Amino acid sequence: MADEARIQVLKEPERNPETDSFMWLFRSGEDGLPPIVLYHYTETRARYNAVDFLDGLSDGYLETDGYQGYNNLPGIRRCSCWAHTRRYFIDAVPKGKQYDYSNPAVQGVQFCSKLFEYERRSQNKKHTFEQRKAYRLEKEKPILDAFWSWLDEQKPRKGSRFETAVKYAQNRKDTLMTYLEDGHCSFSNNLSENAIGPFTVGLLEKLAVQRNSKRCHCQCTGLHNGRDGKGQ
């Protein structure tokens, strides 16, 4: 599993503090073992950063968000995140129309939510990986088939959020289906997002403290030099 977050680094040699950098997160999957979470800092979001970090990994699956930099990594089968897909349809639902089941965006949300429901049932049943794969093929594959057929019938308004949601899903059809191949595969990338979230929040808090400390230092210097900060 993988995710990446945009950050800014203070006092980095030969780089402006406002320059964007990236913190990458690579996490072990839902294999029942204690999780392994690794962080990797780079100056850019370029694809070669993921390629270099994952060098040597083969015959495995990688759960990610929609970033295209994860496409076609050597020896890796990519799984796209269904939470991201559902989020696009949720964003496309007009205000106050959440329960209007005739609305196409609401219908898209319903398809995704039904898949999440079966995933929760599988977890509650404590399925083995083999049982999870069989359960997904039995319960979720028919929903997926209906979802793709439904998508093909949609004629969203150009430039609308619903069009964005439809294209997002259609462009990732293959990788959104990969999770059916192996019961070890995750259905969403939420675990990665949850793991990188505390890092980015902590970074923002530290940045706020540094900025406040700098402001306090300037104020104290002003008081030391004179009440108006201009000196005596």
Image (cartoon, helix red, strand yellow):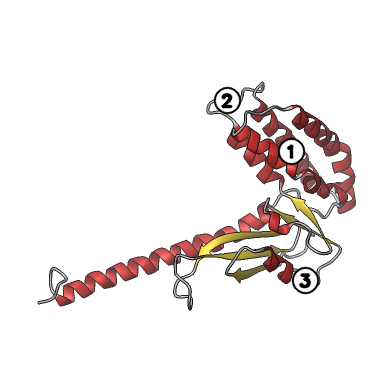
Question: Which residue occupies the extreme left position in the image?
Answer: 232
- Dot 2 or dot 3, earlier in sequence: 3
Which residue is depicted at the point 75% across and 68% down?
54
Which residue is depicted at the point 13% across and 74% down?
226
- Whether pointer 2 and pointer 3 mark residues with C-beta atoms closer than 8 Å, the reply is no
Question: Which residue occupies the extreme front position in the image?
Answer: 158
Residue labelled with disc 2: 97
User: In the structure shown, which secondary structural element does the residue marked by tag 1 occupy?
Assistant: helix
Determine which quarter of the picture holds residue 35.
bottom right
Of circles 3 and 1, which is in front? 3
Q: Quadrant of the N terminus?
A: bottom right
Q: Is residue 183 above or below residue 23?
A: above
- Dot 3 or dot 1, earlier in sequence: 3
Determine which quarter of the picture holds residue 29.
bottom right
- Whether pointer 3 and pointer 1 mark residues with C-beta atoms closer than 8 Å, the reply is no
Q: Total of numbered circles in the picture?
A: 3
- Dot 1 or dot 2, earlier in sequence: 2
Q: Is residue 142 above or below residue 215?
A: above
- Whether pointer 1 and pointer 2 mark residues with C-beta atoms closer than 8 Å, the reply is no
Determine which quarter of the picture holds residue 161.
top right
Residue labelled with disc 1: 117
What amino acid does circle 3 point to? Asp
The label number, if any, that marks residue 55 in the structure image: 3
User: In the structure shown, which secondary structural element does the residue marked by tag 3 occupy?
Assistant: loop
What amino acid does circle 1 point to? Glu
Of circles 1 and 2, which is in front? 2
Which residue is depicted at the point 70% across and 67% down?
48
What amino acid does circle 2 point to? Lys
> Mark 3, residues whose alpha carbon is within 10 Å: few (<14), some, or many (≥20)?
few
